[in-house]
Image (tube, helix red, strand yellow):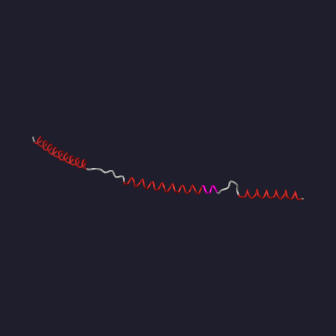
Amino acid sequence: MTKLEHLSELLVEELHSFKQEVNRLERIEKNLKSTSIKADSNQVEKMINAYLRKLEMDQTTQQENRKELLRKIKNTRMIPNWLVILALLLFLSQALAIIYLLLR
């Protein structure tokens, strides 16, 4: 009989601890139901604004680089300077040769 008493005593203790745990879980559930969660998007907005500022600065830099490149391209020549000088010298020598032949 002592084993049966001992087992029933253990069972009663287990039931009592189980009831305490159920009560604790019910209190936690009530707290969770009464707790409201606010959606705070301030951090996300700050990150997006920082990214947009960086994007705008990058775009401005790219536009400045593009303008500088277009200015450099506009001021370049397709014919090198030495070739222009050589052509002028040849033209002048031809003109002088024709004048010499005509005046002779």
In the image shown, does 81 or 75 lie closer to the viewer?
75
Q: What stretch is highlighted in magenta?
A: 70-74
Question: Horizontally, is 82 left or right of 51 in the view?
Answer: right
- Residue drawn at the location 74% of the way across and 59% of the way down: 85
The percent coordinates of residue 69 (x first, y second) are 59, 56
Question: Horizontally, is 99 left or right of 74 in the view?
Answer: right
Question: Horizontally, is 85 left or right of 4 in the view?
Answer: right
In the image shown, does 28 or 89 lie closer to the viewer?
89
Q: Which residue lies furthest to the left in this view?
A: 1
**Does the magenta segment cover residue 78?**
no
- Residue drawn at the location 54% of the way across and 55% of the way down: 63
In the image shown, does 4 or 91 lie closer to the viewer?
91
The percent coordinates of residue 66 (x first, y second) are 57, 55
Location of residue 95 (image quadrant)? bottom right
Location of residue 10 (image quadrant)? top left
Q: Which residue lies furthest to the front in this view?
A: 103
Above or below, 59 against 22 in this view is below
Name the main secondary structure of what is drawn in magenta. helix
If the image is split into quadrants, where does the C terminus sit? bottom right
Circle count: 0
- Residue drawn at the location 87% of the way across and 57% of the way down: 102
Question: Horizontally, is 54 left or right of 33 in the view?
Answer: right
Location of residue 71 (image quadrant)? bottom right
The percent coordinates of residue 88 (x first, y second) are 76, 58
Q: Which residue lies furthest to the right in this view?
A: 104
If the image is split into quadrants, where does the N terminus sit? top left
